[in-house]
Structures are given as structure tokens and as C-alpha cells.
Amino acid sequence: MSKTRTWMLGIGCLVVVVGVVLVVLAVCGLVGAGMPGKVVLAVHLDGPIAELRPEDPLAELMGDTTVGLRDLRNALVRAAEDDRVLGVRLRIDRFGGGMAAAQEIRALLSRVREAGKWSAAYLDTVGEFAPGNLQYYVAAACDEVSINPMGDVNLIGLSVRTPFIRGTLDKLDINPEFKGRGDYKTARFMYTEKEFTDAHLEMMEWLVDSVMDQLVEDIASSRGLEPSEVRRLVDRAPFLGEEALEVRLVDRLEDWGTFTARLEEGDNAKAKVLGLRGYLRRSKARSSGPRIAVVTAVGAIMRGKSQKSFNPLLGSEVMGSDTIAKAWRDVRDAGDIRAAVFRVDSPGGSAVASEVIRQEMARTAEKIPVVVSMSNLAASGGYWISCGAQRIVAYPGTLTGSIGVFAGHINMDDFWDDKLGVTYGRIDRGANAAIYGDLEDWTDSQRQIVDRMLDRIYGAFLDRVSASRSMSREAVDAIGQGRVFTGAQGADNGLVDLIGGFDAALNEAKRLANIGIDEPVRLVDFPKVKPIWQQILEQQKEEETAVRAGLETLDAWWRTGRATVPGVVWMPPVYVE
């Protein structure tokens, strides 16, 4: 091929690539798209609510439909302040967030209302033969709520079901032994009990009562009803559409087309409807002002790097101590960071990994203000990593506390032998060589060793909370013992400084850094959020790694008879419907 043809081919390829990029940018609204004079912001909730999603123009084209809490906050805060925005149109099909996420969105919608903008919510149905509590809870924050005439309102109250696998273990001839510090450190009871202990039941009831009180009081306030009336309505639910209209839980029965057409009348007739991402792309983000770091830590806490998890006990995310510790070092090395918000959503996990993260956070807090913003869950290790920040902010519905520790093992010898016919030849050198194995019960001396280890970890947990909260060790122990609290209860017990969401934490960080509350700031994410193309490229590798790790775990299981359990400062997530 001649040099001329090669040159022409290269130019042609470059033109094609540039053309494709321009098409992509145009589709994503980055080229030739100005902000209209009048706007209606359209928000669609249909699935999981993530803390963060990549700010990547290719995300939608690559199939990423995840809604991020940060995106919601940015859009709704800007909408409240933007004179061009007339109102917010909210559609809820599915809601994949917890109570705290729902409270964050409600607070943001209230901010829009307080700015004099209208808000309207539409749902085909509030649950379909399924609970619709949180869907309705979010929708009720709007000025008006509409459902399809065939829809129902399943505001049926809260239900908690806690699984216990002791019966299964008994049938399999597996003997569990788990020791803990605190009658309320309930993670171990999943293995050792067949039903609630008295302490476990007591704790679950105070948690459900607290969340139910918040649900009822907030809905009553939004809908102009008395809390007692809302409780009576909950006991009568579910409601058919006409019944929901009659008792004032909804304002209109209409389909989606009628709903949208009605909102396009009057003053809204000339307004352009922009979706969440389209509005964020066209509205101007703050690019000046002091820099505040946002360190986001999500998932079960483990040593190593953050990654996806395929372990149903741990959830979909793993918070790696190496990743988050490095993020805190990067914050300090950045040099021009005035304060930091530590966003935590975690049930805990490894005590060692939790301490590694806490140490780096505390070192940062010695140099700049650090304010913890707790999301849905910041318990056990999730609370441990918060110790040392100047302030802790939580939603009323955040689950937090769980200051306690447990450890144990399961004796699977009879299972392998009687059920599967697998027997093990055994050779040990050292009296405690098999202390971490799962083929025999602990000896009395080994139980004493485990007790010493648990005492050490629990004592360290008490010390860190005591120093962080300016409480005596005895006072921390009195509210510790594994007790889980909602954020509202945590504030009553001295574990939380302020009830509120991300904005409340940001304002605290600004105040501590002597930044004016109304002064614009730039939020800088640590660790940096990966673009969608990189996530997709890494996804296959992560899946292959997870499969390989799973196979290695199964291989080690049958070769050694040893199964692994979550970390010692871990709390199984509490799911409330």
C-alpha cells in the first residue's frame, strides 16, 4: 500500500471516529444543547439507588440506568435554586433503596417545594401484591400523588423476617459454636438459634417501632393528616384505587398519559421536560470555591481492594481497606482540601480492615475537619471506621451502633462422614493447630483463647468509641453489647451528633472549615469514580475472579473441612418491608 493511500485511510478512520464521537455527544446532549428558558425536571425511580454512578456521557448508551443519590441531590438542589425550573415530575416504578435513602430523597423534594416549585408523583400502583411502603413514603413528599385507576396503595406497615439456619445445620449434623460480646450481637444467632432470643426480639422491636414512627409521622405531615389517622389507615390497607382516593392517600386516579398531559398545561405548556441526566448535563455545575473531599465507602469491610461481591451474606459490594485507606492518604496529599465528608454505608466486617481505614481517617481528621455522613447502614465495623471524625451525621432511619464482636466456627465432621462419606486423616503439630478448623469442637483451652481475642477486640472497640464520643468506657459498654439503633435512637444515646442527610453533613464540614454556609464549594470524590467503559471492561475480570475464588473456596472446603464466615465486627443487614 502506498504512503498516500495509507495516509488517506488514516484520515478516513479519524473522520469516522470523530463523527461517531460527535453523534454520541449529541445523543447525550453535550453538543448543541443549551438550557431552555422553562424546564420541568423529570425524575424516574425504577430499581436500585446507588450512592454514586459514573459521570460518563457514554453511560446511558452502554446500558447504565442506575440512579445515584449524588445525582439526585445535585439535580434537585440545582432545580430548587434554578429560576428556569418550574417543577419536578416524579415517576416511581420500583424503589431499590433503604429507609435512609428514601429520607434523603424526601428531604430533597421538600427543598424543591420550599423554593416555591411544584412537585407531582405518579405510580402505576403502590405495590402490586407486594409492600409499597417506601414507594409511597417517597411519593408522599410531593405536592400531589397520582396512581393508575387499576392501581392499589399497599401502605400495609412494616414486616421483618429474620432467618435462622440452626435447624438446617442440625439436619446436616453440623454443630455451630459462636461466642460473642453482648446479648444484642445477633449475627451469631443466625447459626446458633432457631428463633429470637429475648434480647434479639427486644432489639428488633425497638428498631421496627422507631422506623414505623418515622414512616407514619412523615406521611402524616406530608399529607396533612394526624399520625393516629395514618396508623388507622395502615391497619386498613391495602386500598383499591378508589378507596385510596377517598381516604386522601392519593389525589388523582389517572394513567401516565393523562398525568403527563395535565402537567403540560397552563404555565407549563412551554416548558421543556428534561430527565435527570439531561438536566445535570445542561445545568452549570459549580467549578469554583474551596474543595471539599467526599470519601465514599460502601459494602462489607474486608482487607484488600474494593470490589464487587457475589457472596449473598456480604451484599454486592466489598469495601477494601487498601482502597479506602489510600483514598484518605490521597486526600491528605492533595494539599488544597479544606474538609472531608466520609459517606459510609456498611454492615461492618473485618476488625483489622476497619481499624486500617479508621487510622487513616483519623490521621486526616487531625489535619482537616472530617464529618461522617451515614447512609442506610453504618453499624459494627461501619461505626468503627467512623470513630475519630469531628462530627457524625445520620438519617433518622439509618441503622447504626452494633458495638460488639463475635466469632465462631462450625464442626462439620459428622456432616462430611455421615452425609457424604468423606473422612479425614488428621495430623497436628501444636496444641492449637486446628483451632481455626471445622472438623472438631473447640477444647476448653481453645475457648479461653477465643475469649481473650474477643475481649481484646471488644475492648478496642469500646476504647475507640469512648475517645471519639467523649464518653466513659462504661457508658459506651452500657449502650454497646451489640445493640443496633436507628439514627434517631443513636442521637438519643450519644452515638450521633446530628440528624440529617448529606447536605447536613456538608454544612457541618463547611462550618468546621470556616467556610460560609452559602459559599459555593467543589466536591472532589475519593476514590475517583471509574467511567462506565472501565467498569464494563473490569466486570468480566471481576466475575472471573469471583468464580475462581468461589471454586478455590469450595476446593479448600472439601480438602480441609473448613468453611469461612463473615468478620467479627459484622452485622447482617436488617431488611424491612
Image (cartoon, grey):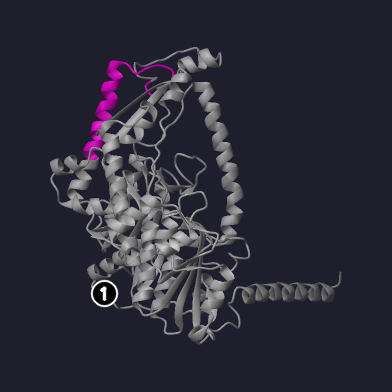
| Spot occupied by residue 267 in the image (x, y as percentages of width and height) | 48, 86
Relative to 438, residue 207 above or below: below
Q: Which residue is mark 1?
A: 515
Q: In terms of depth relative to the viewer, which is nearer, 36 or 535?
A: 36
Label 1, residues with CA under 10 Å away: few <14, some 14-19, many ≥20: some
Between 277 and 252, the one nearer to me in the picture: 252
In this rendering, does residue 415 appear at all?
A: yes
Q: Is residue 442 magenta?
A: yes
Q: Position of residue 42 (x, y in %)?
A: 51, 72
Whether residue 51 is visible, yes or no, is: no
**Stretch in magenta:** 435-460
Residue depicted at 38% across the width and 65% down the height: 106
Q: Is residue 33 left or right of residue 313?
A: right
Q: Determine the secondary structure under disc 1.
A: loop
Q: Amino acid at mark 1?
A: Ile
Nearer to the camera, 289 or 407: 407
Residue 118: x percent and y percent?
Answer: 42, 77
Left or right: residue 49 versus residue 4 is left
